[in-house]
């Protein structure tokens, strides 16, 4: 999962209005078939072991982790990769890959400690999150 934390006025996610952008793989039978079986084992597009099924996360599961922690999901958009052109395209279909945009609430009524909200899923997402150049922070509890 790729995470990009964009602040409004330098605030990042610690301040209201900060944006979080996440791209990841949905947890569907189709994503297993294409992401693991086809791309790793048949076509060899990526090395074997690149993807781990247990680490895939559905948009609904991601939202259930973000919302209790003061992040409101604003947009979810599908992403499709064309292995022939090497380009990504936006799509309405989120069954394979998707991007999500969440915003830190301006008024947070209560913060639910991460240990009480899907502890295993939150830890799994954080353990598997990685940053690339230009990214600011990983998802915080």
Image (cartoon, rainbow, N blue to C red):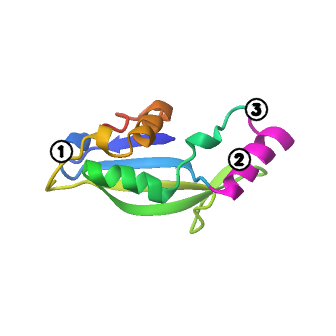
Label 1 with label 2: CB-CB less than 8 Å? no
Residue at (46, 31) in percent of width and height? 127
Q: Which mark is residue 119?
A: none
Q: Mark 2 = which residue?
A: 35
Is 70 displayed left or right of 92 in the figure? left
Q: Mark 1 = which residue?
A: 15
Dividing the image into 4 quarters, which one contains the C terminus? Answer: top left
Choose the circle earlier in sequence order: 1 or 3.
1
Label 1 with label 3: CB-CB less than 8 Å? no
Choose the circle earlier in sequence order: 1 or 2.
1
Magenta stretch in the rendered image? 28-47
Residue 86 on image: x %, y %:
71, 47
Residue 39 in magenta stretch: yes
Give the CA separation, mark 1 to mark 2. Answer: 36 Å
Compared to 100, does 48 lie above or below?
above
* Quadrant in which residue 12 is drawn: top left
Q: Which mark is residue 48?
A: 3
Give the CA separation, mark 3 to mark 2. Answer: 11 Å
Query: How packed is label 1: few (under 14 Cα within 10 Å), some, or many (20 or more)?
Result: some
Residue at (34, 42) in percent of width and height? 5
Residue at (45, 42) in percent of width and height? 121
Q: Is residue 43 visible?
A: no
């Amino acid at each position: 999962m790729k995470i990009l934390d964009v602040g409004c006025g330098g605030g990042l996610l610690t301040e209201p209005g900060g944006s979080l952008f996440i791209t990841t793989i949905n947890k569907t039978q189709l994503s297993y078939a294409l992401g693991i079986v086809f791309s790793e084992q048949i076509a060899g597009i990526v090395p074997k072991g690149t993807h781990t099924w247990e680490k895939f996360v559905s948009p609904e599961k991601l939202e259930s982790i973000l919302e209790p922690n003061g992040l409101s999901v604003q947009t979810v958009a599908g992403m499709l990769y064309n292995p022939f052109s090497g380009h990504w395209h936006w799509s309405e279909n989120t069954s394979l890959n998707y991007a999500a945009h969440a915003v830190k609430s301006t008024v947070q009524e209560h913060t639910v400690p991460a240990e009480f909200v899907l502890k295993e899923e939150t830890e799994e997402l954080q353990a598997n999150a990685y940053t690339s150049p230009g990214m600011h922070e990983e998802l915080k509890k």
